[in-house]
Amino acid sequence: MLAARRRHVQIASVTRCVEPEWLDELPATDRRAIQSRRDLRRLNTVMGHARFIANALRNYPNWNGRIIDLGGGDGRFLLKVARSLGKGQRDVEAMLIDRLDLVAKEAVREFESLGWRLAIKVGDVFEVLAEMPKQADGAIMSNLFLHHFGESQLRRLLGLQSERAGIVIACEPRRSAMALVASRLVGLLGCNAVTRHDAIASVRAGFANSDLTASWSDAANWSIQERALGSFSHGFICRRKAG
């Protein structure tokens, strides 16, 4: 089923194994894909990624109410971030970039009720970002997205972000023995075969130590925090330095 082609990437002397995940290869309307997206929403709640991103935004007021979500899927994760920020953060211009248009009209209305205006860009993330103007403010976020890319693509993607934001925030799988064990147990939470496969693949492709910092090309002009989030997640925050 959905044969995987592995790419081994050497980062900071630790080998990542990047391979296609089944959810990315299934049609969006496939019942297994629909169930897997539900699984991911449940796992995201357990891992607390939305709170991490919301807290990073609170601590960086210069994002000026403009945010881009890379690989945002159906928009439900971004909606969790919006709710975590609360009603005090209104009049937000949000853009969701994904290769598929999965955002339901109900989700768009929920954003509007929070004072957020959501634009949806369907296409290749590299092409969409490259077409956007360069700027030194605003925020770019991603959740469980960067680990899909090998080293050369990762460097390119982070470079595009650094030219178009004042803060870049990412939550990713943590590459560790404990996280790998946990990834083999997600079936106990009711996750289907697609999610069970992808959970293991995502940990193998995940990040540890300063992997993402090593792929950031302009470290001198940014304040970078990269650390473990609990036992299973990896957080990355880059804030542009003043001036």
Image (cartoon, rainbow, N blue to C red):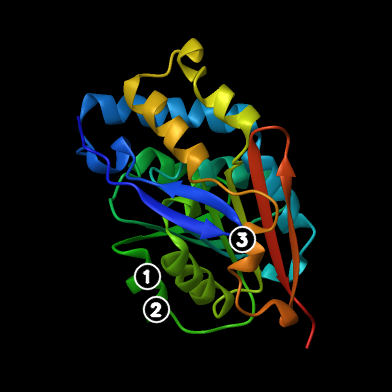
Q: CA distance from mark 3 to mark 1?
A: 18 Å
- Give the mark nearest the N terminus, 3 or 1: 1
Q: CA distance from mark 2 to mark 3?
A: 20 Å
Judged left or right of residue 233, residue 120 is: left
Give the label on residue 130, or none: 2
Q: Quadrant of the N terminus?
A: top left
Q: Residue 176: name its quadrant.
A: top right
Check disc 2 and give the amino acid type: Ala
Residue shown at the point (52%, 17%) measured from the top left: 185
Q: Are marks 2 and 1 in contact (CB under 8 Å)?
A: yes
Give the label on residue 126, or none: 1
Whether residue 235 is visible to the viewer of this picture, yes or no, is: yes
Q: Residue 236: name its quadrant.
A: bottom right
Residue shown at the point (61%, 57%) measured from the top left: 13
For label 3, the SS is helix
Judged left or right of residue 100, residue 44 is: right
For label 1, the SS is helix
For label 2, the SS is helix
